Image (cartoon, rainbow, N blue to C red):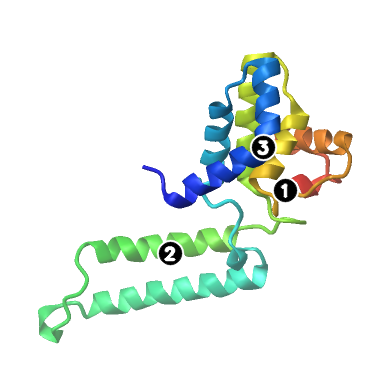
Amino acid sequence: MRSPEIDKWVREFFKKELPLLRELWLDHKIPPAEIIETVSLCKFASMAHTLPPELRSARQRERLAAKIKKAAESVRLVRSVNCPVWQIDVLDQGGIDLEFRLDVVEQKIRALRPSSGRPENRMFRECASELEKIFREHTKQSRYWQIAQLLHATWPHEWVRHGDKQAEISAVKDLLRPRAQRSPHNKRAR
């Protein structure tokens, strides 16, 4: 079941991108529904698109890890007096699991390493990859320019325009390359 917010976004996207969708249908028989479904799934996916601001800098990660460690210590303290004698009976067996999970989360947060430049939006790559599959299936070509146009239409404030058509195509190609092969100068696309 879709929400009114998603329905509204799909209608606006369709109106705005009608010329491109029409071109893809008339020239390549790519159903607009496939493209709209793909971009709307990527746009409204429940997955976090970028690393939360609290985890981007070392200082903020350390503060969050310290808070989680303190919460784990509090759980240990409450667990130690969790008995009918003290009239505290708030933690059941799940309390031990919670303590362990908090310790694991703390360690994982402390193990995160900073990334240089703008935080990566993983949905750009997922969406570009899915669109590339659709285009290859119907046209046997990647259609990088159309992918760039659709990414900008889906995320107008996040997807940075790269200037001319060739720069846009290069940004999409770079986005679709495995991480180790990406060019270091083209970080804006991520």
Whole-angstrom CA distance, mark 3 to mark 2, is: 48 Å
First along the sequence among labels 2 and 1: 2
Q: Amino acid at mark 3?
A: Glu
Q: Is residue 72 above or below residue 128?
A: below
On the image, which quarter does residue 32 sit in? top right
Nearer to the camera, 38 or 52: 38
Q: Nearer the viewer, residue 141 or 120?
A: 141
Query: Is any atom of residue 181 visible in this view?
Result: no
Q: Position of residue 187 (x, y in %)?
A: 79, 48
Q: Which residue is mark 1?
A: 159
Name the residue type under label 2. Asp
Residue 1 x %, y % = 36, 42
- What separation in Å lies between label 2 and label 1 (alpha carbons)? 36 Å
Q: Earlier in the sequence, mark 3 or mark 1?
A: 3
Residue, x 78% and y 36% (percent of image)? 174
- At mark 1, the secondary structure is loop
Identify the mark nearer the N-term, 3 or 2.
Answer: 3
Give the class, few, some or many, for how many residues have Cα within 10 Å of label 1's Cα (few <14, many ≥20): some
Label 3, residues with CA under 10 Å away: few <14, some 14-19, many ≥20: some
Tag of residue 103:
2
Front residue of this view, candidates 119 and 11: 11
Q: Which residue is mark 3?
A: 17
Q: Is residue 74 visible?
A: yes
Q: Nearer the viewer, residue 189 or 166?
A: 166
Above or below, 24 against 9 in this view is above
